[in-house]
Amino acid sequence: MGLTCSSCKRKSIVDLYHVEKTSNNQVVVALAGNPNTGKSTIFNELTGLKQHTGNWPGKTVTNAKGFHKRKDKEFIIVDLPGTYSLLANSVEEEVARDFICFAKPDATIVVVDATCLERNLNLVLQVIEITNRVILCVNLLDEAEKKHIKIDLKKLSDELGIPVVGTIARNRKGLETLMDTVYNVCTKKIIPRPTPIPYPKTIETELQKILSMIEPLVPNDFNPRWVALRLLDGDTDILDKIKHFTDCKGACKHA
């Protein structure tokens, strides 16, 4: 996938996660979710035979990319590894997090299982701390109905501040609405406004201390609050990655 940063001795993070667009009508959409949520079914239903698989450069994790046409846009859909979080405790988590963070997709769909929504929302909350261009796909609504679970999709959307679409992917139910919503987010007809996530007072106090120190170091296209949270969690590697990404991106532009 993509650019080569000739000024860097090691392969740039720009090279690892850049998705090349061959026309102005193409947009990049990330597909994220916990394992066993039906994410791969959604990917296959949307892309059909128009997909390619391989491995992420330098990783043992599968890289699946497919194409979906909607109105005047062609969506390049990148199926991220199934993960329960984005804390980068595994290669899968690192790839999913870094793609959302550094590839800057035009939209990110997060697929959750309607039968265990509370557990799956952990990943959703982590994604909306990185980007506001998020659509929540509540899949497996038929399984939830069998268990007498009812989900108020509108209230969930209001609470999270992002579009929410219900689907039964194996029957293709809701997939047209899902992609219409993705289209509207990518074309800015819908602008998600994720609800800020409050933390206990002790954590917020420490966050503000870190924020005051790192805000001058964090480029505008990164959320400094999310970076501060990662540092507070002990992820000191994130600042180096951001600096490496910014330096290499700048070098590529001037090459």
Image (cartoon, rainbow, N blue to C red):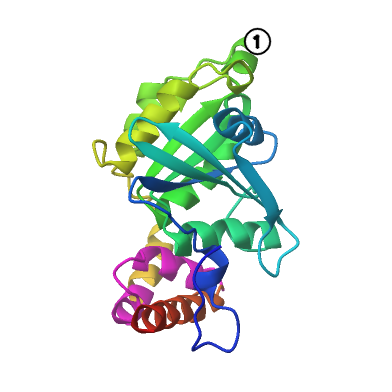
- Which residue is located at x 52 percent, y 40 percent? 67
- Which residue is located at x 52 percent, y 59 percent? 99
Residue at the spot of label 1: 146
- Which residue is located at x 32 percent, y 31 percent? 158
- Specify the quadrant that holds the C terminus: bottom left
207 or 10, nearer to the observer: 10
The quadrant holding residue 179 is top left
Q: Where is residue 220 in the image (x, y as percent from the top left)?
A: 29, 69
Residue closest to the far left: 189
- Specify the quadrant that holds the N terminus: bottom right
The quadrant holding residue 194 is top left
For label 1, count other residues whose C-alpha is less than 10 Å away and answer few (under 14), some (14-19) or many (20+).
few
SS type, badge 1? helix
Magenta span contains residue 226: yes
**107 to the left or right of 32:** left
Can residue 90 be seen by looking at this rendering? no
Looking at the magenta stretch, what is its main secondary structure? Answer: helix
Which stretch appears magenta?
210-234
Q: Where is residue 60 in the image (x, y as percent from the top left)?
A: 76, 62
Magenta span contains residue 132: no
Position above or below: 138 against 25: above
Q: Position of residue 53 (x, y in %)?
A: 68, 49
Residue closest to the far front: 22
Position above or below: 247 against 94: below
Q: Position of residue 111 (x, y in %)?
A: 55, 35
Q: Amino acid type of disc 1?
A: Lys
